[in-house]
Amino acid sequence: MSTMMKHKAIEESRKKFLSGIGVPPKTNFVADDFQQAAITNLAQGIDTLVVAPTGSGKTFIAIQAMRDLLSKGQRAIYTTPLKALSNTKFSEFQQTFGPTHSVGLLTGDRKIEGDSDVVIATTEIYRNELYRGHGRYSLVILDEVHYIADPQRGAVWEESIILTPSSSTLLMLSASISNAEEIAAWIEETRNKECRIVQKAQRPVELRYGFLHPKWGVIPLSDDKGPLSPEVAHYYSGVELDMTGTRVAMPRSGAGRHGRGSRSRGARDGRERDGSRRRRR
């Protein structure tokens, strides 16, 4: 294939790969069935575990549930596993609920109006508040609840669920829980109240895999010819794994395939130096 034809083929594949990316046209929003089901559960005070792909609108459920509580003069807390994410949600919810309702932030670094109508916090901070006998909220939202399976931090989510008063309603959000029934059963047994599962399997936003090629730029990782595009396969054709077997080791400049040439020359040069030293002796 000539260079011009190759450029044209790559441009066509890139155009197809990037198609549809951008701001969609504005349309009237209609809540999905799983969103409506979760909102209805929460309005009835039923603990709800929502398992849905990223981008499907889990935050919308939380916002609608908080709006319902705020209209009744009650309080809510939204917890996340990361300080950076908590800061982002703090700014987002200030615009969503302010200035009618106050929004606070509790992390290891910042404490802003902790007695607000809506509080954003890291899950560790919320757990610590429960230890002190504080943290009385009508609605407790645990985002990224799949952290409950983390060997180091999972206990924080377990303790948060155990210590949250049964009078509070739990909304738990995740995109990657595979044993929802098992978790919901444990929550019901622990809190002595019903926990309903709301799931959505279909991904609303297509997931595509790309590769940033040093010569061709962004290209699809796979194409119609196979699971690995020819450009990506050619790029990695002269490499091998490092000593750990987990990382790609690029060959040195001038080395042969798989880098064997550089090692052979180095070994040969070493033998020649040893021989010259022996002759001098």
Image (cartoon, rainbow, N blue to C red):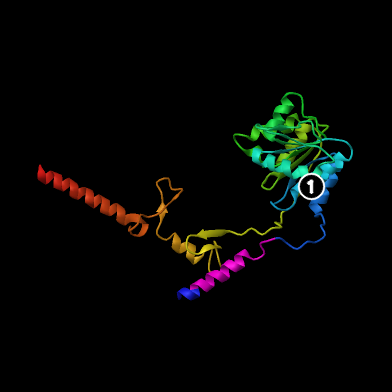
Residue 125 image-quadrant placement:
top right
Question: Is 99 placed above or below 111 here?
Answer: below
Q: Residue at x 53, y 66 (%)?
A: 226
Residue 274 image-quadrant placement:
top left
Residue bounds of the magenta highlight: 6-22
Q: How many marks?
A: 1
Q: Is residue 17 magenta?
A: yes
**What SS does tag 1 mark?**
helix
Q: Main secondary structure of the magenta part?
A: helix
Which residue occupies the extreme right position in the image?
Answer: 72
Using the rendered image of the protein, determine whether residue 159 is visible from the camera's viewpoint: no
The 10 Å Cα crowd at callout 1, few under 14, some 14 to 19, many 20 or more, is: many
Residue 220 picture location, percent across and down = 56, 63
Q: Is residue 262 magenta?
A: no
Residue 169 image-quadrant placement:
top right
Amino acid under disc 1: Ile
Q: Residue at x 55, y 70 (%)?
A: 11
Location of mark 1 (residue) = 61
Residue 67 picture location, percent across and down = 84, 43
Residue 271 picture location, percent across and down = 20, 49
Q: Is residue 4 left or right of residue 128?
A: left
Question: Is 218 placed above or below 99 here?
Answer: below
Using the rendered image of the protein, determine whether residue 118 is visible from the camera's viewpoint: yes
Task: Return the residue nearer the eye: 115 or 68.
Answer: 115
Q: Residue at x 80, y 34 (%)?
A: 116
Q: Is residue 247 left or right of residue 135?
A: left
Q: Quadrant of the C terminus?
A: top left
Q: Is residue 174 left or right of residue 196?
A: left
Which residue occupies the extreme top position in the image?
Answer: 132
